[in-house]
Image (cartoon, rainbow, N blue to C red):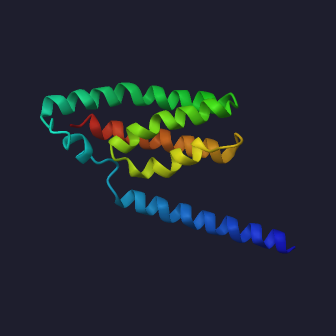
Amino acid sequence: MIGYLFMELANSELNENKKNNTEQAEKEPLYDLSLLTATGRSDDEFLLKLVALFIDIMPENVKELKIALAGNQIEETRRAAHKMKSSVELWGIVSLRDTLKALESISEVNAEAHSLANHVEATINKVIADLKQL
């Protein structure tokens, strides 16, 4: 009985943390270009090339992640998440930092892993939609 109550409490706290993280993420900008512009090459042409590269590459990375999950390929899922992490950091997409770390360390493919991947996909799609407006 105590174990059950502990599990319920833990799940309740997890759901509350998810809610708080979602609310915080909605208040923050999806991405931050300051790291890209800090390179000294902040001219519009260079930035637009980087945007085009991001728009081309990231959907493929998301696709790799989702295919690996669908095939229950844990190592490929971890690899795909790791591959995306540096781009997410460079583009300042802080809302995906913890999500990708969690996917990097999964030990089994389950509903939570699929939910995390769906969050990655939705966020990347939002960022791409915003970047297309530049």
Image x and y of residue 33, in percent = 25, 44
Residue lying furthest front:
39
Q: Quadrant of residue 50?
A: top left
Between residues 39 and 96, which one lies in front from this camera angle? 39
Regarding residue 125, the answer to whether it shows in the image is: no
The C terminus is located in which quarter?
A: top left
Image x and y of residue 95, in percent = 43, 52
Image x and y of residue 12, in percent = 66, 68
Residue lying furthest right:
1
Q: Residue at x 35, y 49 (%)?
A: 30
- Reply above or below: 66 against 127: above
Q: Residue at x 34, y 47 (%)?
A: 92
Q: Residue at x 61, y 63 (%)?
A: 15
Q: Quadrant of residue 37?
A: top left
Q: Residue at x 46, y 25 (%)?
A: 60
Image-based side of 111 in relation to 30, left or right:
right
